[in-house]
Image (cartoon, rainbow, N blue to C red):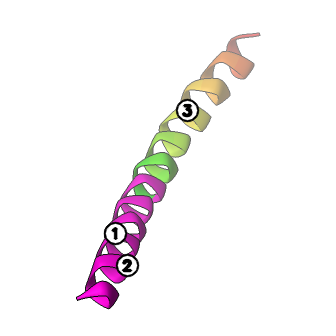
Amino acid sequence: MKIIKYVFPFMLMRSVRSGMLGYVQQENKQFRRISGIFAGGI
């Protein structure tokens, strides 16, 4: 039981982190596009 107690949060954190990374990468693409428009405007 102790092993599950330690492994489960680790797996959960890993999945959450990978999900966050995917979201951040998506946001970065949009941000880059917007900053590119601003750079073009300036």
| Residue 33 pos. (x, y %) | 56, 34
Q: Earlier in the sequence, mark 3 or mark 2?
A: 2
As shown in the figure, which amino acid type bears the numbered disc 3?
Phe
Q: Residue at x 34, y 69 (%)?
A: 9
Tags 2 and 1 touching, CB below 8 Å: yes
- Of 13 and 20, nearer the camera is 13
**Residue 39 horizontal side relative to residue 18, left or right:** right
Q: Quadrant of residue 22?
A: bottom left
- Of 15 and 36, nearer the camera is 15
As shown in the figure, which amino acid type bears the numbered disc 2?
Tyr
Q: Which residue is at the far top?
A: 42
Label 3, label 1: how far apart the Cα atoms are? 32 Å
| Residue 28 pos. (x, y %) | 55, 42
Q: Nearer the viewer, mark 2 or mark 1?
A: 2
As drawn, 38 above or below 3: above
**Residue 29 on the magenta segment:** no
Tags 3 and 1 touching, CB below 8 Å: no
Res. 6 mark: 2
Q: Secondary structure at mark 2?
A: helix
| Residue 3 pos. (x, y %) | 33, 89
**Residue 31 horizontal side relative to residue 15, left or right:** right
Q: Tell me the chief SS of the magenta region.
A: helix
Q: Residue at x 77, y 10 (%)?
A: 42
Q: Residue at x 73, y 20 (%)?
A: 39
Q: Residue at x 61, y 36 (%)?
A: 32
**Residue 19 on the magenta segment:** yes
- Of 34 and 27, nearer the camera is 27
As drawn, 39 above or below 9: above
Q: Nearer the viewer, mark 3 or mark 2?
A: 2
Residue identifier under label 1: 9
Q: Earlier in the sequence, mark 3 or mark 1?
A: 1
Q: Which residue is at the far left?
A: 1
